[in-house]
Amino acid sequence: MKNQIEVISSLESYVDEELPRLLPKLENRWQPSDFLPSPENENEFYEQLREFRQETQSLSDELFIVLIGDTITEEALPTYQTMFNRTQGAQDKSGVDDHAWARWSRNWTAEENQHGDLLKQFLYLTGRVNMKEVERSTFRLIKNGMDMGANDDYERLIYPAFQERATKISHDNTSLLAKSQGSSLLKRICRTIAGDESRHEETYKKFVEKIFEIDPSQAILSYANLMRTKIKMPARFMDDSPLVTKTFDTFAFVAQKIGVYTTFDYASIIENLNQRWNIHYISELKDEAAKAQEYLSSLPSRYRKLHERIIEQISQTQTPNFNWLISRDQILT
Ligand SMILES: [Fe+2]
Ligand SMILES: [Fe+2]
C-alpha cells in the first residue's frame, strides 16, 4: 500500500509544470470593479446605479435566494483555505512556502476571494437584500466551520474536484436564469465566475487523475468512501447551531426548484468524474477496490432516479419566506 502523503508530494513537479496553464496572469484577469457602477465620478455613478437597479428589479425572489446562498458559500473562504492546508503532502506550512502546491493554493484562494467580493457588492447595490441577515449567515457559517466528510488525503483532493464542478454548474445555470429574467449584467457576472470554477475543476481533476495513475486501488477506495456518505455541501452550517442545516436545506430546496443545482446535476458530476478518471476501465482491481468500482459505476443512475422523485415533490411545495430578502413593498425605488 502506497503512502498517500508521499504520492501527493511526488506530484509537486507535475503541479509546477501545469501551473502556468492553470492560472491566468493577473494583468489579464477580470476584477470585481469591472462589473459594478464606478463611484469615481458622482454624476456618472448615480446614473449607472439607477440603470443597475432598474435592470436588477426584474430578477425573481427565488433567483435572489439562490444568489445569496451562493454568495455566502463563496464568502466562507477562510474555511476552504484551511481545508486545503490540511491535505498532507500539499500543505503551505509557513504561509509563504515556495513549492507548487502552496502557490496553487494561495492563487486559488485569491481567485475565490473575488467571487464573494463581486457577488456581495452586486447584492448590496441592488437594494433588494437584507444585508445584515446575509452578513449574519456568513458569520455563522465561518464560525461553525464545515465538515467535508473526508477521511484521508486523497479524499481531500477529490472533494474539490467534485465541488468545483458543482459550483461551475450552479453559476452557469444562474447565468442562464439571469439572462431569461432580463439582466445581462448578472448573466455576465455568473458566466465569468463559472469560467474560474471551470478552470479550478480542471485543475483538481488533473491532480486526481495523476493519483489514479500512480495508486489506482487506493484512489478508487477514497473516491467511493467520499461518495458513500454523499458529498457534504460547504455551506451547510449557516444556522445558529453548528449542527443545524435548516437554512441551508431551504436554500438548497430553492436551488433545486429553479434548476440551479439539482440531484440530476449531482448525478452528472459523478458521471463526469467517473469518465475522466476511467473508473469503469481500471483493470485488475481486487476485493474492496473492485466493489468500489461497481458501486461508483452504478451511482449516476441511482441519483437520476432519485431526482425524478424529488422533482415531483418539489413542484408541489411553495418556496418559504427568507429573511435574506427585503419584501417588495418595503423597497423604495
Ligand atoms: Fe468560487
Ligand atoms: Fe472555485
Image: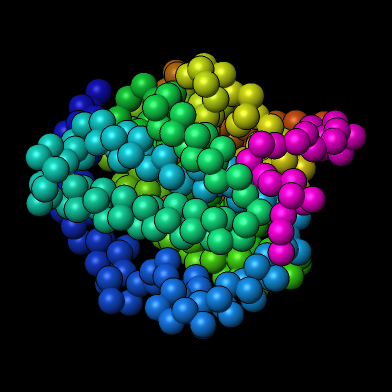
| Above or below, 308 relative to 171 | above
Residue 202, by quadrant, is: bottom left
* Percent coordinates x, y for residue 77 in the rendering: 37, 42
Q: Does the magenta stretch include residue 84?
A: no
Give me the residue at 46% from left, 46% from top. 74
Query: Which secondary structure is most common in the magenta stretch?
Result: loop
| Above or below, 271 relative to 34 | above
Quadrant in which the N terminus appears: top left
- Left or right of 209 in this view: 6: left
Q: What span is colored magenta in the figure?
A: 310-333
* Percent coordinates x, y for residue 46 in the rendering: 55, 76
Can residue 23 be seen here?
A: yes
- Left or right of 268 in this view: 195: left
Give me the residue at 24% from left, 36% from top. 85
Can residue 203 be seen here?
A: no
Q: Does the magenta stretch include residue 317?
A: yes
Q: Nearer the viewer, residue 254 or 310?
A: 254
- Left or right of 178 in this view: 88: left
Residue 78, by quadrant, is: top left
Give me the residue at 51% from left, 83% from top. 44
In the orientation shown, which residue stands out farthest toward the right? 316
Residue 10, by quadrant, is: top left
* Percent coordinates x, y for residue 200 in the rendering: 40, 54
Quadrant in which the C terminus appears: bottom right
Give me the residue at 56% from left, 37% from top. 133
* Percent coordinates x, y for residue 171 in the rendering: 58, 56
